[in-house]
Image (cartoon, helix red, strand yellow):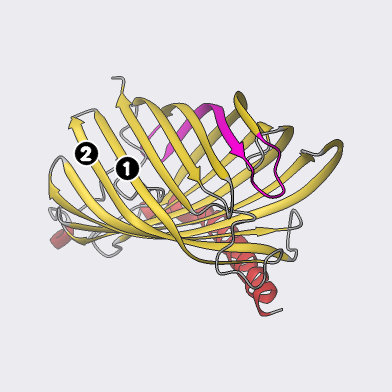
Amino acid sequence: MTGDRYGRFRLAGLTAALALTFIASGSAPAAAKKKVPPEYARIEIPEVPDDDIFGFTAPTGLGDAGELGLASEYDGRPRKRDGSYSAVSAKYELGYTLSDTWWIGGSAFGSRHRIRDVTGLDDVSTTAFDGLSLEIAHRLVTRSVTNPVAVTLAAEPRWATRDGTSGLRADAYGVDFKFFTDAVVVPERIFWAANLTWMPQRAQDAGDRSIWLKTSSTVASTAVTFQLSPQLFVGAEARHLASFDRGWIGDRLGYAVYVGPTLLWKIASKIAVNLTWQPQVGGHSVAGPDLRYDLDNYERAQFRAKLSVGLN
């Protein structure tokens, strides 16, 4: 019961945060017109790099107006409680920065599942097309001399064709609502970020596609990274993932906590590689209440490898 109340509290808090920031956006332009005191006019404001320096956690930067970029991202999820299990989701994204505060991108997805002798899952070995998405992001709060924290909101509607756990054919429709914030801790040395994401979804039951299910999930993450050189960033990230049995506020099915190192290597001025490996360090599943981890809804580890390329 405590876990259920905690899940409802997190969802309610996330929803309230998104609502408040959308409401606040109406007054953002007016705030931007305020006069800057003369003594602040020549002060350079430190910024968090726009690259994926935090692992799974995203920064608030959207790039410079007119920038066109391509990203190839692979998210892996190995190991269940028994048998042999591996799943990889591939995302190919083309993004364009409309202005300093608006970004839009379209993505195509693929998936790869190899499952053998895992309790509750069919044995499969399949590679498949896994749908499309469209994402739009708006930088709501920019950094200033008196405000070190930036905020960006994003929404990403998605159509999927595969069940993410079993790899079986199952259509799904959902939206990822995202809240990003970050700050400069030490200019050109240490950076911090946090993300909140709520993902309601309506999907076919992979076992019986005539049945449609409404579920939701949340992700809360925080990360810190250190700039060792202009080309190299290393850090650490912690994420809390939770799943629920309804599209809105429902009973929590389980949660998992992942912690691990992150790395960004800027191969060239417009080419960067982002890597992270994160084992599950804690979790709980309703289906396995006496077991240490949640390996019913999640995996023993998760990793990301992402290549980003600027096209202009």
Number of other residues with Cα within 10 Å of mark 2, as a class: few under 14, some 14 to 19, many 20 or more:
many
Asked if one can make out residue 122 in the rendered structure from this viewpoint, the answer is yes
Number of other residues with Cα within 10 Å of mark 1, as a class: few under 14, some 14 to 19, many 20 or more:
many
Say whether marks 2 and 1 touch (CB < 8 Å).
yes
The local secondary structure at tag 1 comes to: strand
Q: The C terminus appears in which quarter of the rendering?
A: top left
Q: The N terminus appears in which quarter of the rendering?
A: bottom right
> Residue, x 28% and y 35% (percent of image)?
273
Question: Is 67 in front, or is 147?
Answer: 67
Question: Is 68 in front, or is 27?
Answer: 68
- Alpha carbon separation for disc pair 2 and 1: 9 Å
The local secondary structure at tag 2 comes to: strand
Q: Tell me the magenta residue range.
A: 98-123
Residue 177 left/right relative to 216: left
- Which residue carries the number 1 mark? 275
Residue 22: horizontal and vertical position, in percent?
Answer: 56, 54
Number of the label disc, if any, that sits on residue 265: 2
In magenta segment, residue 5:
no
- Residue 171 in which image quadrant: top right
Q: Is residue 55 above or below residue 256?
A: above
The tag earlier along the polypeptide, 2 or 1, is: 2
Kindly identify the amino acid type of the residue bearing the numbered disc 2: Trp
Outermost residue toward the top?
A: 312
Residue 285: horizontal and vertical position, in percent?
Answer: 65, 65
